[in-house]
Image (cartoon, grey):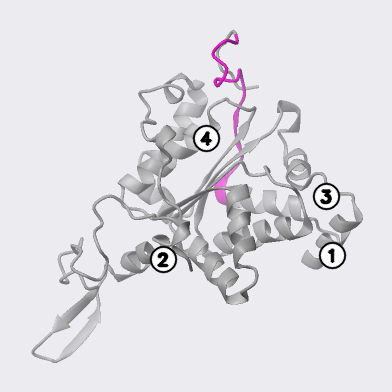
Amino acid sequence: MTSKRGSARAPGSGREGSGARCPYGLCDGSGFVIDFEANSARRCECMPARVARRLASRLQGRIPTRYEGVSFERPPISELPQPVLEALRAYTHDISASLAEGRGLWVVGDVGTGKTSVAMLVSKLAIAAGQTVAIYSLPRLLNLLREEIAHEAGVLALLDDLTAVDLLHIDDLGAHHSTGWALEQLYLLIDARYQAGRAIVATTNVKDNELHPDGIARQLAAPLLGSKAAEGADQAMGPGGHLGARIVSRLIEICGDPLPLFGDDLRRPYRARGSLTLP
């Protein structure tokens, strides 16, 4: 794996396996509890977290500069509709417990309504809680997979790393050129996290008239669905099924019903802004 994937190390985590503090006070930071009298060693309780952080260090887990100050006290989060705020506070109240249960959050709605800020706040709080996080836009994630495609082991290792982190953050889910290959990679990744009981936070641009599973599935797969390429991709994943619907089904299993966020484009200060309301 190459270093260009960035770092997902939580603040203050130090260098794993070289003296980083054991949160349980059992080992010397190596991940092993050594019994000198018995001349033996056993894995410390902190070892799984150390392994996960080392895997995550090869992924992109930094909050972008634009979103470093995101918080409940600042716009656009503070200006979100009350139902959205309540759902967000409930999910992040004990973010470690939410992630341990494999529960995610999927925010859908119009462009510029604060979806990415919501997802970034979730990732920021997860990192602050010492959880491992990988943050990608979907186009960037697919580009990484394409870079590894010449080496099958590289693709499998990247998918393993993306499955191992506590939280996978995918922004602009659906913002890609829909090819059979792209949809299949997305399905494989989401299904792997579903099977592993791992959480996902995702954002998707949809119109209010598309806010139902079939509408979102069509958007994820457009313009591929209905074409010969789509039929080929669907057959590869099983007779009668199609990838857009399978992706949506898995995401709903992980995240529950999509959290809708509609209203004015907050990126356009010159536009008259009304209150953000749910449909």
Q: Quadrant of residue 256?
A: top right
Q: CA distance from mark 4 to mark 1?
A: 34 Å
Q: CA distance from mark 2 to mark 1?
A: 33 Å
Q: Is residue 170 magenta?
A: no
Disc 2 versus disc 1: nearer the observer: 2
Q: Give the residue drawn at x 75%, y 41%.
A: 219
| Circle nearer the N terminus (4, 3) | 4
| Label 2: element kind | helix
Instruction: Estimate how packed mark 4 is, as few (under 14), some (14 to 19) or many (20 or more) residues with alpha carbons within 10 Å.
Output: many
Q: CA distance from mark 4 to mark 3?
A: 26 Å
Q: Which residues are magenta?
A: 254-271
Looking at this view, name the residue that lies furthest to the right: 228
Question: Is 10 situated above or below 159?
Answer: above
Residue at numbered disc 4: 116
Q: Is residue 266 magenta?
A: yes
Three-letter code for the amino acid on which mark 3 is drawn: Leu
Three-letter code for the amino acid on which mark 4 is drawn: Thr
Question: Is 90 situated above or below 134?
Answer: above
Q: Which mark is residue 73?
A: none
Closest to the observer, 141 or 110: 141
What main secondary structure does the magenta stretch of the protein show? Answer: loop
| Label 4: element kind | helix
Residue at numbered disc 3: 224
